[in-house]
Image: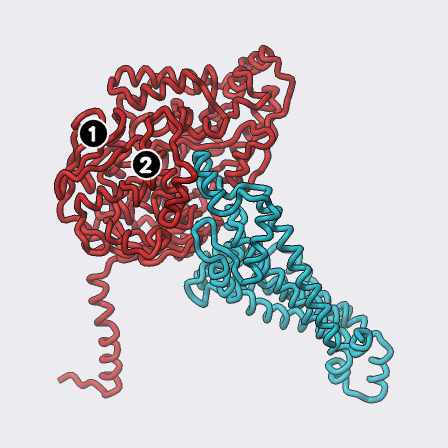
Amino acid sequence: MLLLPRRGFLAMSGAAALAAPRLSFAQSARPSLTVAVQKIATSNTLDPLTEQSNVGTRIMNSYLECLIGQNYQDKLQPVPRLATGWRRIDDRTVELELRRGVKFHNGDEMTAADVAFSFSAARMFGDTTPEGWDRTIAVSEERITQRSKELPPQVPAVSRRLWPSLLQVEIVGDYTVRFVNATPDVTMEGRIMALGSQIISRRAFEEAPSWLDFARSPVGTGPYKVASFTPDTELVLVAHEEYFGGRPPLEELRFVQVPEASQRVNGVRAGQYDMACDLTPDQFDTVTADPRLEIAGGIINNIRVTNFDKHDTALADPRVRQAMLHAVDRQLIVDQLWMGQTVVPKGDQFEWYGDMYLSDWAAPAYDPQKSKELLAAAGYKGEPIPYRLLNDYYTLQVNTAQVMVEMWNQAGLNVEIEMKENWAQIWDPEGTRGIHDWSSGGSFPDPVATQPNQWGPQGQAVQTGEYGNDEVNRLCGVLQTSTDRAARRQAFRRMLEIVEYEDPAYGVINQNATFTAKAKSLAWKAAPSFAMDFRPANWPA
Amino acid sequence: MTAFLLRRVLRALLTILIVVAAAFVALRTTSDPAIVVLGPDAPPEAIAAFHEAWGLDRPLWVQFGSYMRDLVHGNFGKSMLDGQDALEKVLDRVAVTLQIMVPALVLGIMAGVGAGTVAALNRGRPLDRLMMLGAVSGFAVPGFVLGLVLVLVFAVTLQWLPSGGNDSWKGTLLPVLTLATGWAAILARFTRSAMIEVLDQPYIRTGSAKGLIWREVVIRHAMPNAAIPVVTMIGFMVGGLLAGAVVTESVFSWPGLGQLIVTSVSSRDVAVVQCVLVLVAATMVMSNMIVDLLYGWLDPRMREGGR
């Protein structure tokens, strides 16, 4: 007979009582994850129409989804997400069949009414109208202020940039919708999968006390729902148990803002964070010195470029801009600053453009002698060229700028760095603008996602008075409205010839890359995108 | 006394007005909030509408008049970035900042005044040298360097404390230690020099000569007379409580007022920045007023002079 003293019995009972719930909890519990990021959101909101940023792309797909998704585990190809299929009705119309049984975070089932509302005047466009690709979008003061109680001014402006010619989304049936455009557009499917085209719950939007309330806690269909959001501090998401794609693998997903890069690394080494994002290659050794940690990530569909203000006196002659392009040794930047972790792109384009990708294209070659000859031919006499620069908004931005300034200096160019606080100062038309950094990222697999938005009639560089080229404007028309693939491909090639060689609008530097420190034990795979994928499919048991 | 207080209050209000006016002009003339909020590729029509919606299209002096009118009614305006009430937004962060600033200040005063006094009483001896070595080092090493070293030791190597954030009370320890070290170093040096000066005075020798015990001489005669420069310095520290931890908050990812200031200034969230500046200026001015009153209490000659 086992004799157990009273004290021993009590101690064992207590231990058992403590251990039992912990054990059962452990059997059913999912892990929670804390991700340290440099910035959570730039707009202090979680709405895709106001948070049109690289950092917004990172978090958005965890709580909101598009009808057509991107294959994050491969090359971002279009895949069915909230729509199970789609077909072209004509060159202005796309019909989509919606997935049945998809539940919003508030328990409502997604129907065609929610999809139509997500692209409605009340949600997106205010009182703006589709006016065609070749006209300035009329987001008049009157129109915006009339609706400003519901929508902030930037929402209709951004929406029309994303969907310049969308007439409406027609409800064909409870689970069938049609996107109808005012003009022919072969990229409609691409726009449907882009940041800003996420589907929201109509009821949740209408019941929110204000636009800001909804923008701080949007209700969508993603695998996680917003539990709390403290701008500049943390975003806490919790599992959406009714997610159509299966049981979310994480109980809680928390993004915390840690501005200092070294502190993000320290935090992951200390075990305080499970992942640390936005690392630079020179931090890799510090991370991998800990045998429990590894680096995930790599090249993404985003290209770092330097934009010219072609109307700047010193840059008006295209030969000076051409000289600048030939003076930069891009491969050296990739090898030394990026430690070979990225590549020099073949111009401002991505392989995922498919048959629109020009595989034989190349950025202007590094040729200092040619650079000097061009400067001599242009009669350049050392006029200063200002380089308006932000403090590492992009990874390795300041280091790259300093290296390029030295390369330009060796070619005989007088480029002067001017540090700026924000984008408004970069774009300030007062004074001489010279050059500034930019990144070009295609949100869908077609050159329309990048080129016309920048260099076309509605492009930001044109609207801000930095660039303008009549032939480029015409080619943008072909790209945006032609349905002839061969003609579009030819137009794209000609456009690159102009904007990268003949009348340079920018110069590519390197393909962008993102790197994340994480525990080796986490079987999570980084996407070739700013987006982080925490759906069940990317979390093997 | 009433006239004295009235003068001080008027001067305080004038100081705050100058701060507000200078910040108002600087923030509105160095960058356009519309482009920051709407993005560089926003259509000109959207930018014009934003200007109209926020009154940025009016002449600067009209905007300032309107702002001041709202201010005297206690309305600090709304954040251009997200529409939230500016005062509410700022006060939320003030509470978080004070969680590290108040303990750091108390710790800094206790350690600094204590060390400075001990050093002065042991002038020229090894203990004095040791304490001044510590004080000079604490003063010379920037807070962000000390903070990172503390993180490497206590978070990364020993894994005793979190590297940043305010998830638990443990998160306050390293930022408090970082801030307190800098303040203690400054106060130790001030206290030491003030005490040494006072200890050389004839009345201290008189006190000793007439038979008072040394501890009483130090506490009752030396310390109050040495307190004036120390209190002045503490006044500055109290005045800087709200905005004095920008770097430390950044290093420790502490979501306080410092981080809000950085974000708001870079994004030209004018209402929020103005609100912060008013609070910071008011704290500094009030702290100086209290220090002035303390002067009179510590040294009756100043009270007399005040009349």
Q: Can see residue A242?
A: yes
Q: Residues within 10 Å of mark 2 (few under 14, many from 20)?
A: many
Query: Chain coloured cyan: which letter?
Result: B
Instruction: Name the spot of residue A171 as percent of width and height, x first.
Output: 17, 40
- Indicate left or right for A175 with A472 as reference: left
Q: Quadrant of residue A267?
A: bottom left
Query: Chain coloured red: which letter?
Result: A
Check whether the beta carbons of the residues at disc 2 and disc 1 lie within 8 A of each other: no
Q: Can see residue A246?
A: no
Q: Residues within 10 Å of mark 1 (few under 14, many from 20)?
A: many
Which of A305 and B117 lies nearest the eye of the viewer?
A305
- Indicate left or right for A454 with A525 as reference: right
Which residue has dot 1 on it? Answer: A93
Q: Nearer the viewer, mark 2 or mark 1?
A: 1
- Indicate left or right for B214 with A221 as reference: right
Callout 1, which amino acid? Thr
Q: Which residue: 87% across, 78% down?
A: B202
Which residue has dot 2 on it? Answer: A528
Instruction: Name the spot of residue B241 as percent of width and height, x first.
Output: 59, 63
Instruction: Classify A502 as above or below B66.
Output: above
